Amino acid sequence: MRVEQISVFVENHPGRLVAILEALEEAQINIRALSISESGEFGIVRMILPHAEKSQESLREAGFTTRIDTILSYSMPDVSGGLLNNVVRPLSDSGVNLKYFYAYTDPATDQAMVVLKPDDLDRAEEILKSL
Amino acid sequence: MIRDPENEQMSRGNLEKLQLERLKAQVAYVAEKSPYYQRAFKEKGVKPDDIQSLKDIAKLPFTSKLDFRDNYPFGLLAVPMDKVVRFHSSSGTTGKPVIAPYTQKDIDIWSEVMARTLATAGVTKDDVLQNSYGYGLFTGGLGFHYGAECLGAAVIPTSGGNTKRQILLMQDLGTTVITCTPSYALILNETALEMGVDLRESKLRVGVLGAEPWSDQMRDDIEGKMGISAINIYGLTEIIGPGVSTECPYQCGMHIAEDHFLAEIINPNTGEPLPYGETGELVLTTLTKQAQPVIRFRTKDITSLNPEPCECGRTHVRMSRITGRTDDMLVVKGVNVFPSQIESVLLDVEGVEPHYMIVVDRQEGFKSDTIEIWVEVSEDIFSDEMSKMEGLEAKLRAEMDSVLAIAAKIKLVEPRTIARTEGKAKRVFDRSEL
């Protein structure tokens, strides 16, 4: 399934993540998933949350550079080999490359969620749907 | 068309003879008439007789903007007031304005060099010229007005502003030439589009643009959007106003009216003259002025001179587009660095000019000087993919290295990091001055 992801450019100093989270708290937005990719002096914070536009507004007001991208989110059984057999291998077998991904589990449903950005979104969506 | 072939196509040898003759006369004139230059020559220990060749100009003292300020308003005036027929003035945004007095002969020469400027830009007496430079104290408005009349073009003296009316007049009177600042040309175009007018389909064919710094990218933009040939001109209130130099339709540097203005390029750090082709500060000496002649004026503008014959047939030396101001110049590891170079790299790499700041840390002996360029990550250049952000950083670093000729550290920063002040952002932060 397609989801909107918000990305935030952040300098790598103590307190910057706090500023992002405070802006979201103030807007009463709950983060569903988060990953940070870092490169020395800066990082990219990527988040899945309800209301991407509203979040973007709050973060812009707090002075952050942000963007919204459509990527894929996929739910699978939270069992050994779940990620491998339900997502990674089928994509790999079809030659789809992943630019990045991150995952989280939901203990209440015994499901794991994976959020991913493939190099070919349409193709990846088709493969994962057909499983 | 070449308006004055005798002067504009004179051989370099004859031109230099003419320049030397006029330089000697101008130096003798100020030594006799100007108390300011009498003092300045005395301090420097130089006499008019010391000028025996053009190279001897290096013996003369420089004149700076500060000298104008310290001697405001009439300290550099070389004629009694009854000979003055007009005053112009600079805006004075950086302190006291510079007063420019003219005699009737000065006005006649100015009109002639402006007519020549327009002819060089490709304007003829058949053109309808809309002059949107501001009329009044500013030299642009009246300078172009008199020059266009001298050439015989039909002038529409709109001055600046009232942009909608400018578009209406342009259509109704069939304007073929617009004279204004480059940024106003873009405003005219935007307003025309809002009014449903496509200037590419109008009779407009030439823009004679100047009085503010602009770039080749901006020229391409203006030419594409307006369907005109955009000609770059250069001038200064201290020297005469517009009319000092202009491009021909080949757009390969601005021909300086060398029979009236003598140009030198100097090393801005040492004041030493530099040979043709080298980049440095432009220094101008008037050769034929009466009311307020100026000897070796330090323009603070950075350019280079090319004496090679131009395809247009003119022999007058060409100065390249101004690439920076000495005020903005930084010396890092013994290399001159200009914010304008950094701006052009940012514009080339990303197609947008992000906010940026230059952070320098200069140490004694300059070997361990460092320069960092902080580039604000705007939404235009931000990507959710780390490889693209790292790629951007690497590309900027490589481009900066090749343009600046020293290694600069590129640092991508959040928008809040770079302080905004009113109007202009403070671009340079010098850690060693803390």
Image (cartoon, coloured by chain):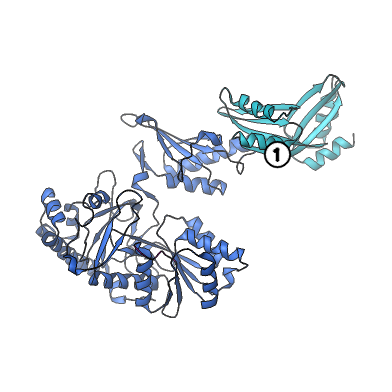
Identify the residue at horizontal 80%, vertical 29% (top origin): A88
Among the chains pictured, the one given cyan colouring is A
Task: Pick whichever, B410 or A23, lies toward us.
Answer: A23
Q: Position of residue B256 (x, y in %)?
A: 32, 64
- Identify residue for label 1: A68
Q: Is residue B10 visible?
A: no
**Position of A76 compared to B206: left or right?**
right
Rendered view: B219 above or below B370: below
**Position of A112 compared to B334: left or right?**
right
Question: What chain does mark 1 sit on?
Answer: A
Q: Is residue B56 visible?
A: yes
Is residue B135 one of those drawn in magenta?
yes
The magenta region covers B132-137
Q: Position of residue A94 (x, y in %)?
A: 82, 37
**Position of B245 compared to A34: left or right?**
left
Q: Amino acid at mark 1?
A: Ile
Residue A77, image quadrant: top right
Q: Position of residue B40 (x, y in %)?
A: 15, 51
Residue A86, image quadrant: top right
Is residue B387 one of those drawn in magenta?
no
**Position of B427 compared to B237: left or right?**
right
Among the chains pictured, the one given blue colouring is B
Identify the residue at horizontal 28%, vertical 76% (top origin): B6
